[in-house]
Amino acid sequence: MIVIHPSGDMTARTYTAPPPLKDLREAVGGPIESVPGWVMMGGKPCWTICNEEGKIEGLPFNAFAQHLWGRVASEYAHLDTLCGSVAILAGDEEFMDAL
């Protein structure tokens, strides 16, 4: 899992099985929501999540994540903004199926 923070810093954590919901919530700082259309990264399937209440809570705009979202799913990215940390989960087929 790669977490993109609003500062542009990134952290990574490796899992051999899908992470528990607690870890996902911790990564984005609250309740999770899928980022629409962001299902590929580097030509591989991924699941991208953000804080469902990021804008409501006044979390800072995540410019780098927004830029990446625009590159992989411009039809969605121009309709909304990503606030707070964004997490990208990717792995082999078995890992992705288990998500």
Image: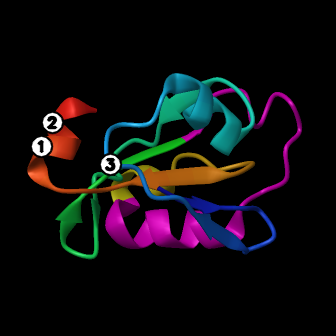
Q: Is residue 62 magenta?
A: yes
Q: Residue at x 67, y 41 (%)?
A: 28
Give the amino acid at mark 3: Thr
Count of all numbered marks drawn on residues in the image: 3
Q: Residue at x 60, y 25 (%)?
A: 22
Closest to the camera, between mark 2 and mark 1, is: 1
Picture coordinates of residue 47 (x, y %)? 35, 46
User: To which residue does mark 1 refer?
Assistant: 94
* Region rendered in magenta: 50-74
Which sits in the foreground, 44 or 74?
44
CA neighbours of label 1 inside 10 A, class few (<14), some (14 to 19), many (20+): few
User: To which residue does mark 2 refer?
Assistant: 97
Picture coordinates of residue 37 (x, y %)? 32, 48
Point out the residue furthest to the left here. Answer: 93
Which sits in the foreground, 98 or 30?
98
Disc on res. 16: 3
Q: Is residue 78 magenta?
A: no
Whichever of labels 3 and 2 marks the residue nearer the N terminus, that label is 3
What's the CA distance linking mark 2 and mark 1? 5 Å
Give the amino acid at mark 1: Glu
Whichever of labels 1 and 3 marks the residue nearer the N terminus, that label is 3
CA neighbours of label 3 inside 10 A, class few (<14), some (14 to 19), many (20+): few
